[in-house]
């Protein structure tokens, strides 16, 4: 087995890189994959990140090649240091995502290649002389952000390279729309459909016209021009209940209204996200027919000179 070669990404790597990215996406969310066009667009610009993307001053993509095959890849960002940039990102460097296949019989040295690529990433961050170093796993696909628990090999790499999880943990849920509650007529409730901040909004009003809460569902998780394959998939962009109306009953009614609309849209799966510590909201989703898909740990920060523990085991969720 030849030694891995770490080098900048070339356009003729695009098919192998897309295959590697899709292998990681498939371990997080079922039935989703991205096209070569999506991957190449993400390397140049991230239009969905309309707040942070304009702050990026420099981008670079590195790959580890072995026997003329891309076995690992990473995408790095350097944020500007001026006052327009948010304080957290100001003069920061970030490994936006890092992917590699776990060791296998046909790629027994993939872990060594990943370590070599990580060393090159840290060297690039050092050359940029950034104030702070972040890392994550934000691939250009729906639901793939933070560091999913379904990637224990990436977690182990980050930890042994000196990264630590400094953010929160979110639970990602999925439900078949057919399993969600059906709307029930209520004389004391009226529902109105409008455009919301994060998709189509369904607002519940009481018999006095007061708004009790709303739910927003986004059925456009993939940009058509990017050719992401995510058929029949939507997510809950917002779910808000007024303090005086809080309770599972209203949340289930709102989910039922959203589900009726999604069936008309030929959407058959709905995603939801909750902080891991919000047990009440998690219980409502489970009661409504959702199941836990995975957990993802947000915000990883590098401590120069530190070395983490060896590989860790997946929690098995």
Image (cartoon, grey):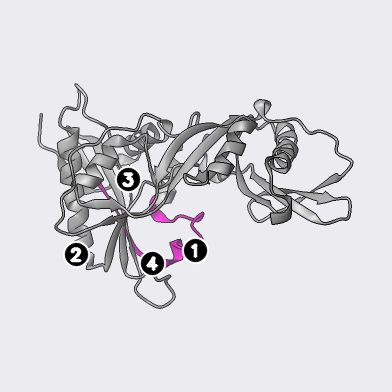
Whichever of callouts 2 and 1 sits on the residue coming sooner in the sequence is 1
Q: Residue furthest bottom?
A: 83
- Residue closer to the observer: 220 or 197: 197
Which type of secondary structure does the marked residue at label 1 adopt? loop
Q: Position of residue 197 (x, y in %)?
A: 65, 56
Which type of secondary structure does the marked residue at label 3 adopt? helix
Magenta-tinted stretch: 43-63
Whichever of callouts 1 and 3 sits on the residue coming sooner in the sequence is 3
Question: Which circle marks residue 127 in the picture?
Answer: 2
Q: Position of residue 258 (x, y in %)?
A: 71, 39
Q: Is residue 295 visible?
A: yes
Question: Which circle marks residue 11 in the picture?
Answer: 3
Label 2, label 1: how far apart the Cα atoms are? 25 Å
Residue 156 picture quarter: top left
Residue labelled with disc 1: 51
Label 2, label 4: how far apart the Cα atoms are? 20 Å
């Amino acid at each position: 087995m030849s030694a891995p070669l770490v080098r900048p990404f070339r356009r003729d790597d695009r098919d192998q890189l897309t295959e590697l990215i899709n292998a990681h996406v498939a371990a997080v969310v079922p039935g989703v994959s991205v096209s070569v066009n999506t991957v190449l667009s993400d390397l140049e610009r991230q239009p969905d990140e309309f707040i942070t993307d304009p702050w990026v001053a420099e981008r670079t993509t590195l790959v580890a090649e072995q026997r003329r095959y891309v076995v690992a890849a990473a995408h790095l960002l350097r944020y500007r240091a001026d006052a327009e940039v948010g304080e957290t990102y100001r003069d920061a460097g970030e490994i936006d995502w890092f992917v590699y296949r776990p060791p296998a019989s046909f790629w027994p040295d993939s872990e060594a290649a990943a370590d070599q690529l990580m060393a090159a990433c840290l060297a690039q961050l050092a050359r940029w002389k950034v104030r702070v170093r972040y890392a994550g796993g934000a691939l250009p696909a729906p639901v793939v952000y933070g560091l999913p628990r379904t990637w224990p090999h990436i977690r182990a790499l980050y930890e042994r390279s000196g990264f630590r999880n400094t953010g929160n943990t979110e639970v990602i849920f999925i439900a078949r729309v057919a399993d969600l509650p059906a709307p029930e007529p209520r004389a004391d409730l009226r529902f109105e459909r409008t455009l919301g901040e994060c998709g189509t909004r369904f607002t519940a009003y009481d018999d006095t016209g007061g708004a009790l809460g709303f739910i927003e569902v986004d059925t456009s998780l993939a940009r058509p021009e990017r050719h992401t394959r995510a058929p029949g998939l939507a997510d809950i962009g917002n779910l808000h209940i007024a303090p005086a109306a809080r309770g599972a009953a209203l949340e289930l009614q709102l989910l039922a209204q959203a589900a009726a609309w999604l069936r008309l849209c030929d959407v058959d799966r709905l995603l939801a996200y909750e902080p891991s510590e919000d047990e009440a909201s998690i219980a409502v989703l489970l009661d409504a027919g959702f199941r836990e898909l995975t957990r993802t740990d947000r915000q990883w920060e590098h401590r120069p000179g530190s070395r983490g523990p060896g590989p860790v085991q997946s929690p098995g969720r």
